[in-house]
Image: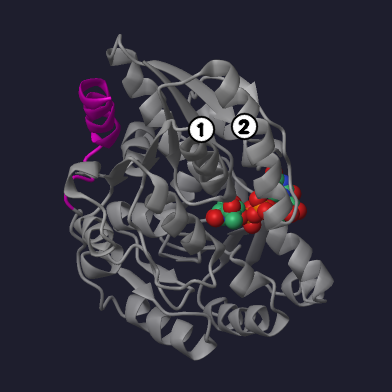
Amino acid sequence: MKIINVVGARPNFMKIAPLMAAYRDFANIEPVLVHTGQHYDERMSDLFFRQLEIPAPDINLEVGSASHAVQTAQIMMSFENVVIEHKPDAVLVVGDVNSTIACGLVASKLGIKLIHVEAGLRSGDRTMPEEINRLCTDAISDMLFCTSENAVENLRKEGVADEKIFFVGNVMIDTLFKNRAKADESKILDKLGLAQQGYAVLTLHRPSNVDNASVLGGILDALEQILQDIPIVFPIHPRTLKSLETSGLSGRVDAMSGLHLVDPLGYLDFMKLMCEARLVLTDSGGIQEETTILKVPCLTLRNNTERPVTAEVGSNQVVGADPEKIMAGYRRIASGELGECERPPLWDGRAAARIAQILSDKL
Ligand code: UD1
């Protein structure tokens, strides 16, 4: 049974790593790994393959960056040839990036079974490109693997048949558990001169936050206030770096004392930074989940989340980009108001094994 597995952008790599490992226990699964090349910088791609011990891709489509339409179309054109040549029994896509929907559409239109891992997440915000990718991918998938009960409910409400839905847990958390000890050996705190619990970590890359100078400026207002208490480490995404330069905000950021602006980090250094942080500020989806497991307070700089379980059981606060709301959330954390977090059901490091078993049995 040949399964083509697709990755494209940074958050896909943590999701595919445990699946590629889990397939080894199933002699009837022959995996093929396709990298679309949506992310291509060493620090956005190859570094993750090495650290997470993902086998080198069998095929790299090398599409690179472009507008949504061009990028999606180029992935589709190249991936169609791959599917026709390899004649897989199924195509497996993860997450919600452009590579996910592009390859999903190709598989579906060629009549190949489509499997979506991390199905059913909904922010309810259709201005997010990822929400469109999620909705469209789920609508054409044959097997939908979910991380939470809430995701299962979303799919049911959209009319997806029960027999297509599998609640299996979270493959990203498999990767976190597997690499936690290795991450603990990272020397990143010494390198940046930081003390345990003595700093915050920030990541920002959503177009709604970084492509709008007034929104980005508001976030900087809040950061300036937090910096009066503690330093902030900011591994900067290439999109955000570009936006700072074009919006004329680079000078302001450079002048912010205590802000450690660093290049994008590998998985292990970033994990270590999160583990030891006083708090994390982010607009990422996956980081909300990782901080839930690490029990690190998280401020999500978005108006919604497709991962509500992190706010229900964990210490995630969805505060948006308004500086006053960010500061209100920060004060709750600083005062120790947020309690212990629970682990969401099935986030136990075994999600990929469950998925591989189901694929082996049912495909
Ligand atoms: C993409 C995903 C987003 C995910 C994020 C994680 C979509 C629609 N968006 O957003 O869901 O959370 O990845 O990082 O799929 N660039 C580089 N080097 C690279 C990759 C990108 O410099 O290796 C720069 C390019 O200028 C590019 C820009 O970053 O135009 C944006 O990259 P793109 O893949 O289009 O979207 P992301 O913002 O990374």
From the image, state whether disc 2 or disc 1 is nearer to you: 1
Name the amino acid type tagged 1: Leu
The C terminus sits in image quarter:
top left
The answer to whether 328 is drawn above or below residue 3 in the figure is below
| Residue designated by label 2 | 79
- Please give the name of the residue rendered at 35% of the width and 50% of the height, measured from the top-left corner: 119
Frontmost residue, 43 versus 153: 153
Q: In which quadrant of the rendered view does residue 265 lie? A: top right
Label 1 SS:
loop
Q: Residue furthest bottom?
A: 324
Residue beneath the point at 66% across and 71% down: 210
Q: Residue at x 52, y 78 (%)?
A: 226
Label 2: how many Cα within 10 Å (few below 14, some 14–19, many 20+): many
Magenta part of the chain: 345-363
The verdict on residue 361 being magenta is yes
State whether residue 48 is above or below residue 274: above
Q: Marks 2 and 1, how far apart in space? A: 11 Å
Residue 233, horizontal then vertical, whole percent: 58, 60
Mark 2 CB within 8 Å of ligand 1: no
Q: Amino acid at mark 2?
A: Phe
Q: Give the numbered dot on residue 126.
A: none
> Under tag 2, what secondary structure?
helix
How far across and down, in percent of the image, does residue 217 sit?
67, 82
Camera-side residue of 227 and 138: 138
Is 65 in front, or is 200? 65
- The image shows residue 154 at horizontal and vertical percentages of 27, 62
Q: Which mark is residue 110?
A: 1
Is 239 on the left-hand or right-hand side of 226?
right
Query: What is the chief secondary structure element of the magenta stretch?
Result: helix
